[in-house]
Image: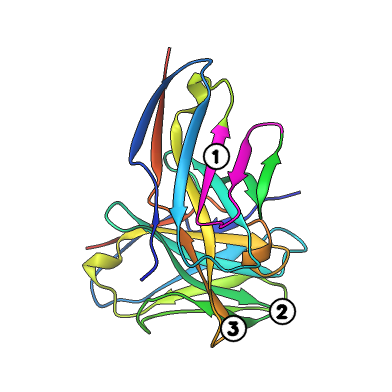
Amino acid sequence: KAGVTQTPRYLIKTRGQQVTLSCSPISGHRSVSWYQQTPGQGLQFLFEYFSETQRNKGNFPGRFSGRQFSNSRSEMNVSTLELGDSALYLCASSLGVAGKNIQYFGAGTRLSVL
Amino acid sequence: LAKTTQPISMDSYEGQEVNITCSHNNIATNDYITWYQQFPSQGPRFIIQGYKTKVTNEVASLFIPADRKSSTLSLPRVSLSDTAVYYCLVALGDTTSGTYKYIFGTGTRLKVLA
């Protein structure tokens, strides 16, 4: 069974631009969660989507948004990029809501904002 | 704001047992505690998940006391390939909104020495 796939693996953007990251979950998984990983803040929860609805949300500004499609694939968008948005963005999928199920992670998308 | 803390680093020798503790307050009463392993440039990899008391699988054991305010990951007989960063992950529930935030621990960098 294929694992969680994130594209692209690397991105370079400049301040003020926007970016869209993509995540394809494990087949049959209905929940997708997104996390930001930085050396200073560690792993931080962004949001979780289940059956195309945002079910849970972390403490990130509205510039960070996401959506989930009917095939459970998910995208995350960051608008008006700031230097501090440089990070590894990780996507995880689970059969059901993440709090009660094992999350399986992709390799991440490394975003550099110049 | 709830915090989930772990020791920053640990050193061990091959063949020894390693115990890593995660302290977490305000954990949601019905959700699981999960531990992950992360190698450089990879996403976290699932190790073990538990709700209470003790859980054991082929690679690790997880001990959770009755109050669930901490958990201890036990790795028996570590090898050089176990050198990695280990994270706990807990779900923090908001009973008012019925939503969750998924909080990773601060991470423990384990170095296994020959």
At label 1, counting other C-alpha atoms closer than 10 Å, the crowd grade (few under 14, some 14-19, many 20 or more) is: many
Q: Which residue does the numbered mark 2 point to in the structure image?
A: A70
Under circle 3, the secondary element is loop
Furthest residue in direction bottom, as rendered:
B96
Image position of A83 (left or right of B109): left
On the image, the x and y values in percent for residue B67 come to 56, 57
Asked if residue B59 is positioned above or below residue A34 in the image, the reply reads: above
User: Mark 2 falls on what kind of element?
Assistant: loop
In 3D space, how far apart are the residues under numbered discs 1 and 3 (Cα atoms)? Answer: 29 Å
Number of numbered tags placed on the structure image: 3
The residue at the point 42 percent across, 39 percent down is B40
Q: Which quadrant of the figure has residue A101?
A: bottom right
- Residue B59 located within the stretch drawn in magenta: yes
Who's the residue at 37% across and 31% down the image? B10
Image quadrant containing the C terminus of chain B: top left
| Tag 1: amino acid | Leu
Q: Which residues are magenta?
A: B58-74
- Seen in the image, is A61 located left or right of residue B76? left
Name the residue tied to disc 1.
Answer: B73
Residue B5's spot in the image, x, y percent? 38, 52
Residue B9 can be seen, yes or no: yes
Residue beneath disc 3: B98
Q: Is residue A100 above or below residue B85?
A: below
Tell me the kind of residue under disc 3. Answer: Gly
x and y, in percent, of residue A106 in the image: 56, 53
C-alpha gap between disc 1 and disc 2:
37 Å
Query: Residue at 58% across / 49% down in the picture?
Result: B65
